[in-house]
């Protein structure tokens, strides 16, 4: 591999991060699809037979939270976040890359703080045996995939920051 190819191709760590982000996003998409199908079945059941799926809104609530967090690492990795580049349109590529890198580091710090706080929040839900109203499901289990997604997001942010700083493609 030549030096110029090495600048654009991710190494083993980058490939692992890409794979994890992709698998997490696919899992989020499958959860979202299942929630959509469940909602259709519940609405049809309510309309046709006056028999909705009990607790459907509880499942949608937890499932949507899991889904949103599952998409974040992939979105960051592929520069899918909203960027206001009004002030950076006329700066050089190197300067823009470094500014993006600083933004990714800040996002990584925020993601790390959210990971820590949500892990503690999930532990509190476990300790106090918090449950949903209709189904009586334990609330803590939903925190596991959310915290895992945020931990991956933290890694992705610092990975993208290092790639952006040196103006390498992600």
Image: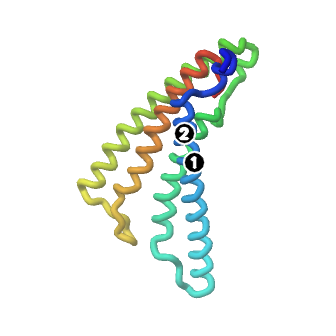
Residue 79: percent from left, percent from top? 64, 32
Residue 69: percent from left, percent from top? 51, 46
Disc marking residue 25: 1
Disc 2 is placed on an element classified as helix
Q: Are marks 1 and 2 in contact (CB under 8 Å)?
A: yes
Mark 1 neighbour density, 10 Å: few (under 14) some (14–19) many (20 or more): many
Mark-to-mark CA distance, 1 and 2: 8 Å
Relative depth, front residue between 87 and 15? 15
Residue 25: percent from left, percent from top? 57, 48
Disc marking residue 91: none
Disc marking residue 73: 2
Q: Residue furthest left?
A: 127
Residue at the image point whose x is 24% and y is 56% from the top: 128
Tell me: 37 left or right of 152: right
Disc 1 is placed on an element classified as helix
Q: Residue furthest right?
A: 90
Residue 70: percent from left, percent from top? 52, 47
Relative depth, front residue between 134 and 144? 144
Tell me: 42 left or right of 82: left
Tell me: 141 left or right of 100: left
Q: Residue furthest front?
A: 1
């Amino acid at each position: 591999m030549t030096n110029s190819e090495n600048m654009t191709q991710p190494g083993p760590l980058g490939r692992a991060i890409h794979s994890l982000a992709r698998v997490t996003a696919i899992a989020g998409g499958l959860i979202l699809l299942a929630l959509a199908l469940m909602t259709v079945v519940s609405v049809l059941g309510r309309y046709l037979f006056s028999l909705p799926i009990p607790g459907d809104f509880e499942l949608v609530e937890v499932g949507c939270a899991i889904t949103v967090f599952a998409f974040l690492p992939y979105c960051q990795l592929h520069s899918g976040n909203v960027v206001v580049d009004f002030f950076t349109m006329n700066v050089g590529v190197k300067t823009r890359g470094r500014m993006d890198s600083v933004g990714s580091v800040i996002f990584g710090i925020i993601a790390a703080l959210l990971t820590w706080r949500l892990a503690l929040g999930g532990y509190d839900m476990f300790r106090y045996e918090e449950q949903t109203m209709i189904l009586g499901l334990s609330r803590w289990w939903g925190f596991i995939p959310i915290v895992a997604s945020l931990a991956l997001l933290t890694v992705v942010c610092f990975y993208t920051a290092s790639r952006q700083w040196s103006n390498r493609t992600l």
